[in-house]
């Protein structure tokens, strides 16, 4: 009887520890998500400048094609270095098909839209409007992921929306002035595509690098077919290779891996999504220093 009693007590103690352990694991995961988001902010702050520099040399399509191609190579290297190639091979067909379909959203459709917006808008306007995606991410996380939004998060959404209107109209509110209407529509449209992509990716359980690699491979296929439809594929000039490579690494492959991992670790996509709003402030400074756009 004594042994049974001890066993019962141990079981009760074990059951009491489980919620505490789960809470500690949740806190550790959330901390990791914050750290990864910090690196994402750092890398994405430089992306707008890299876009504008690359677009001095090549068309939006050519930028997309080669950045996607280089991203496929870098993601494959990351996949191999992490020893996860076998997870790609043994992934379930249903999951692989989903990752392939999402490759149409990103990189293909998202960057077709975004790079065109950057081509017709000043970098600071295109970037600022594009960073409305955390707003969309926050709003859509409720119906798609079932995450509750707090009053403070909703207030942040409203303030951010007003800020986007001020940026697009340059404070005039009733008119876009000399700003391209098409560019504004494209930049805003890119936020919806981007937010949907990450939300659909957040909870399927597939390794982030695996799903990104599959998605980018299919994105490269879609991009190549699109290029053949619009008139062929160009070889970039020598000056374009550095910004093309930079975009592929620090806008796409490496940073995507960090961001998708953060989304899988966090308990609230809205919580880390709101942190991304720090990025435009640094991005504006870099655009001013590197590209020469006045703030």
Image (cartoon, grey):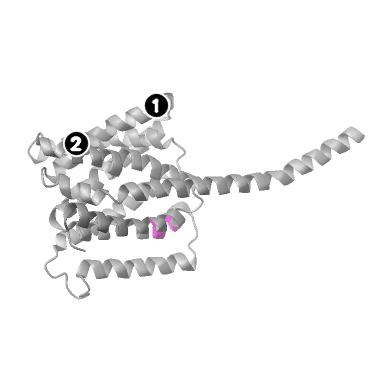
* Crowd around label 1: few <14 · some 14–19 · many ≥20 (10 Å): few
Indicate the position of residue 100 as horizontal and vertical percent values. Answer: 32, 36
Quadrant in the picture for residue 18: top right
Check if mark 2's residue and mark 1's residue have beta carbons within 8 Å: no
Please determine whether, in this image, residue 152 is positioned above or below residue 254.
below
Residue 95 on the magenta span: no
How many numbered discs? 2
Indicate the position of residue 264 as horizontal and vertical percent values. Answer: 46, 44
Name the residue: 49% across, 65% down: 150
Residue 1 in sight from this viewpoint: no
Indicate the position of residue 106 as horizontal and vertical percent values. Answer: 29, 43
Name the residue: 74% across, 41% down: 14
In the image, the segment drawn in magenta is 137-143
Q: Nearer the viewer, residue 133 or 294?
A: 294
- Name the residue beneath numbered marker 1: 81
Indicate the position of residue 267 as horizontal and vertical percent values. Answer: 51, 51
Residue 13 lies left or right of residue 280; in this view the side is right
Name the residue: 41% across, 55% down: 273
Identity of the residue furthest to the front in this view: 289
Residue 100 in sight from this viewpoint: yes
| Callout 2: SS | helix
Front: mark 2 or 1: 1
Residue 230 lies left or right of residue 40; in this view the side is left
Identity of the residue furthest to the right in this view: 1
- Name the residue beneath numbered marker 2: 66
């Amino acid at each position: 009887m004594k042994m049974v009693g001890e066993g019962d007590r141990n079981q009760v103690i074990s059951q009491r520890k489980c919620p505490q352990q789960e809470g500690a694991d949740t806190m550790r995961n959330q901390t990791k998500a914050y750290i990864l988001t910090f690196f994402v902010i750092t890398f994405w702050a430089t992306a707008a400048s890299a876009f504008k520099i690359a677009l001095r040399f090549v068309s939006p399509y050519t930028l997309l094609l080669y950045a996607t191609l280089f991203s496929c190579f870098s993601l494959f290297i990351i996949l191999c270095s992490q020893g996860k190639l076998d997870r790609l091979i043994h992934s379930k067909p249903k999951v692989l098909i989903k990752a392939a379909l999402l490759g149409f959203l990103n990189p293909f459709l998202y960057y077709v839209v975004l790079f065109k917006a950057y081509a017709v808008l000043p970098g600071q306007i295109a970037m600022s409007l594009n960073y409305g995606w955390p707003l969309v991410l926050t709003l859509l996380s409720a119906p798609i992921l079932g995450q509750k939004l707090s009053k403070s998060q909703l207030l942040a959404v409203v303030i951010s929306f007003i800020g986007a209107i001020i940026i697009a109209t340059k404070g005039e509110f009733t008119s876009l002035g000399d700003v391209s209407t098409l560019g504004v529509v494209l930049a805003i449209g890119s936020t919806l595509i981007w937010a949907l992509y990450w939300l659909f990716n957040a909870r399927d359980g597939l390794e982030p690098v695996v799903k990104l690699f599959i998605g980018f491979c299919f994105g490269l296929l879609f991009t190549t077919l699109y290029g053949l439809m619009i008139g062929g594929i160009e070889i970039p000039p020598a000056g374009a290779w550095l910004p093309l490579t930079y975009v592929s690494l620090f806008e796409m492959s490496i940073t995507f891996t960090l961001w998708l991992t953060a989304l899988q670790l966090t308990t609230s996509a809205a919580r880390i999504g709101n942190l991304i709003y720090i990025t435009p402030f640094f991005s504006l400074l870099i655009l001013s220093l590197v590209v020469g756009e006045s703030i």
